Image (cartoon, helix red, strand yellow):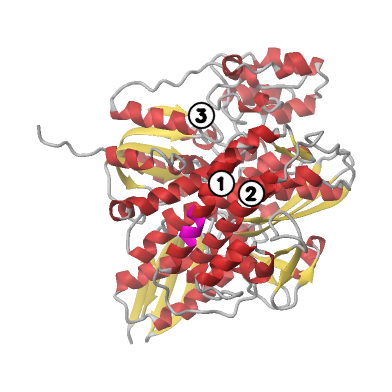
Amino acid sequence: MKSRIIKVDYLARVEGEGALYVKISNNTVTDVKFKIWEPPRLFEAFLRGRNYSEAPDITARICGICPIAYQMAAAQAMEDAFGVTVDGQLRALRRLIFCGEWIESHALHVYLLHAPDFLGYEDAIQMAKDHSEIVQQGLQLKKIGNEVMTLLGGREIHPINLRVGGFYRVPTKQELAPLVDKLKWARDAALETVRWTATLPFPDFEQDYEFVALRHPDEYAITEGRLVSNKGLDIAVREYDDHFAEEHVPYTNALHSVLKERGAYLVGPLARYSVNFDKLSPLAREAAGDAGLGPVCRNPFKSIVVRSVETLYACDEALRLIDEYEMPEKPAVEVEPRAATACGCSEAPRGTLYHRYRVDDQGVILDAKIVAPTSQNQKSIESDLWQFIPKHMDLPPDQLTWRCEQAIRNYDPCISCATHFLKLHIERD
Amino acid sequence: MPPSRKPKLAVWKFASCDGCQLSLLDCEDELLAVAGQVDIAYFPEASRAMVKGPYELSLVEGSVTTPHDIELIQQVRRRSKCLVTIGACATAGGIQALRNFADVQDFVSIVYAAPEYIKTLDTSTAIADHVHVDFELRGCPINKEQLLEVVSAFLYGRKPNIPPYSVCMECKRRGTVCVMVAHGTPCLGPVTQAGCGAICPAYYRGCYGCFGPKETPNTDSLSKRWSHLGVKEQDLVRAFRTFNAWAEAFREESVAHEK
């Protein structure tokens, strides 16, 4: 009997600390555990007793890579609870800063974290020695995403300008104008990124996922919508807890999410793209077609192309929003707290993020629940590995290990969000 | 002259949001130049190549919250010639230090259905509570220009030029009208260390203390001013009890307003 363990103690190029344990006995995969060792930080506990208005700034600190997603989910949850609608140009500005976060986060993952796997480099700095122009392009694209966030949010990491009801200060039309030329450059660069990523070598690997994403009748959903899947789910955000459950398993500090009726599901770029393909801008749709993507993409390794398409869309959409911008009279809508249950969802770069709070009539938070994208994807990550490893058993051990890491990085896992520490062991009998 | 070996840089993570180490990758214009000056030997968020120490410079993000962290930080110290903490978690325990004011087992059972699976300490503490720290860089998040200044100061063997004065100085320099004087907006700027560039007041918002207490902060006097503006005692507790809640001056001030 031959047994084999593949072991990676600290998975690199992901945000946070995680590991994978794989055991192979007699050429059959017998165990796969995607482990999250990130120490728990207990946000849901210390949010109790805080004021509703503090939730956006506090929950932003869950993740330095996607703070806007947290701020928006928290703010929208509170607005929903207090019966307030933030619309018009305030809503447009929120969408604009979110586009900035998508550009920044996707460019980081595509160029600095994921592309080196396809080209066989340990990191983007090594890659830059042979592909300087490509890495420079990625860094500049990322920088423009950060500039959108900085202009609207005050800074790119943990922006300070978002609040329940809107913003503290809104920009004039003139203040947004310098972004236009930069975003036009970024749109061209993103188009080149789609073309370039489409030429990368992809393993022939497809899975029949249940894709879950926000869907909105008028736009490619980022900030709001209904939760929709390709297998029949179509619910209001408020109904989330009726359909999804979180399980606590012993080997990980993150809770596993499942659809109560069908189990594992997938959130993130592949899901959004497949659920909302018809809502992409014509430019993004055309670029996706030229890159060989159909309206649905089931190959998780091609998430790098889909992320590039979404980056292109975000640039296109940001330009549209700036073009149509008129400075609103007030930076925020007045908010009066009342006792209620607050639910909010946003599409973080890595996927759907859900917040639920119970607040009292003074606006004090009584309890909080936060479900991050990576915890929802854990089961799909494991399921990919169960399917992927048997097809590549003949690879040398170090190559197989690297491929497994790449399969995890397909998800751009943010372990800080889900908690964090990735160790990879593959064990063979 | 023979070419000298590039100094080795390591980036370590403890309990944190990854935002401060992201600041290094956010130096889009400087990243490749930095990589030309130092050997980025250990930076798991950016590279799967993990070169063994010792390291000339270790940047440490995050706070100590688990038994494993206590062991790891000792190892990091032993393997590092110079150890610099980056951000509020590493320097003051971070937002997760709110557990220090409560019973951590209550906290764990609120978040996890099976609390017995979770290994965590009763407190979240700064790196300097465990090992000698050569320099502490403040902020939630840190300012990337300050980060480059610290790395550059280290490379040239000089003291980093990081001013310990308050956010008020930055508002004056930026030409921002004082939000507390002009609009009666409660602001922690007078007791908070500069470094962010005084962003919040420029957006008509009071400072909320991301960079922690300045040197010799008069928190008591500021609290009185806030009370005159109508801020309630429990709101003063919350104002001082955020991302730098366990920094001594903020901790004492929050406790003073607790019933």
Name the quadrant of the N terminus of chain A: bottom left
Other-residue count near label 1 (Cα within 10 Å), few / some / many at <14 / 14–19 / ≥20: many
Cβ–Cβ under 8 Å for marks 3 and 1: no
- Chain letter, disc 2 residue: A
Kindly identify which residue carries mark 1. Answer: A183
Q: Relative to residue A166, is residue B216 depicted above or below?
A: above
Kindly identify which residue carries mark 3. Answer: B138
Q: Is residue B228 left or right of residue B45?
A: right
Q: Amino acid at mark 2?
A: Ala
Cβ–Cβ under 8 Å for marks 1 and 2: yes
Q: Is residue A272 left or right of residue B82?
A: right
Other-residue count near label 3 (Cα within 10 Å), few / some / many at <14 / 14–19 / ≥20: many
Asked whether B146 or A173 is in front, the reply is A173
- Whether residue B227 is visible to the viewer of this picture, yes or no, is yes
- Chain letter, disc 3 residue: B
Tag 3 secondary structure: loop
Residue B221 forms part of the magenta stretch: no
| Quadrant housing residue B82 | top left
Q: What is the C-alpha distance between the residues marked 1 and 2?
A: 8 Å
Identify the magenta region: A189-194
In the image, residue A334 lies at what x, y percent? Answer: 86, 37
| Quadrant housing residue B244 | top right
Q: Amino acid at mark 1?
A: Leu
Q: What is the C-alpha distance between the residues marked 3 and 1?
A: 32 Å
Residue in the picture at 72% in, 34% down? A170
Residue in the picture at 29% in, 75% down? A396
Q: What is the C-alpha distance between the residues marked 3 and 2?
A: 33 Å
Q: Which mark is residue A318?
A: 2
Give the prevailing secondary structure in the magenta stretch: helix
Q: Relative to residue B174, is residue B80 depicted above or below?
A: below
